[in-house]
Amino acid sequence: MDDVRLVKSIAFYRSFHDAADMLDDDLRLRFFDAIRLYAFEGIVPDISDDEGDRMLKMAWTLAEPNIKKSMDNAINGARGGRGRKKSEQDPEP
């Protein structure tokens, strides 16, 4: 995912903070590492479905679509944004 190098920042939502507060220290660190590695390196975290990781998996499942959208927005913005829609284009003479 070479485009991920275009990502300079992502939105960090209050819900990420709230979810992290519900995790113990080890899981919280893994959650934050998952966010930063996914957003800035394109590395999808390997989160097992073990009993201890269920809270982490739930937090990641809820956060991942928001992080992905933030990454997509950053990549598209670095490329100049989306093109004009047909209705927004200058009328032909």
Image (tube, helix red, strand yellow):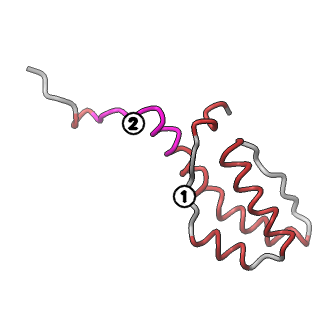
Depth-wise, is mark 2 or mark 1 nearer the camera? 1
- Classify residue 89 by image quadrant: top left
Query: Residue drawn 58% across and 62% down?
Result: 12
Q: Please, what secondary structure does the residue beneath circle 2 have?
A: loop
- Tally of numbered tags: 2
The disc, 2 or 1, on the residue closer to the chain's N-terminal end is 1
Q: Nearer the viewer, residue 33 or 90?
A: 33
**Which label was assigned to residue 11?**
1
Q: Residue furthest bottom?
A: 22
| Residue 13 drawn at (x, y percent) | 56, 66
Which amino acid is tagged 2?
Arg
Which amino acid is tagged 1?
Ala
Point out the image quarter for the C terminus: top left
Q: Is residue 80 above or below residue 67?
A: above
| Residue 77 drawn at (x, y percent) | 45, 39
Q: Which residue is mark 2?
A: 82
Query: Residue drawn 49% across and 45% down?
Result: 73
Magenta stretch, residue numbers: 73-85
* Left or right placement of residue 69 versus residue 87 in this view: right
| Residue 51 drawn at (x, y percent) | 91, 72
Rate crowding at label 1 as few (under 14), some (14 to 19) or many (20 or more) other CA atoms within 10 Å: few
Query: Residue drawn 63% across and 36% down?
Result: 5
- Classify residue 31 by image quadrant: bottom right
Q: Is residue 36 magenta?
A: no
Q: Is residue 54 above or below residue 73?
A: below
**Which label was assigned to residue 38?**
none
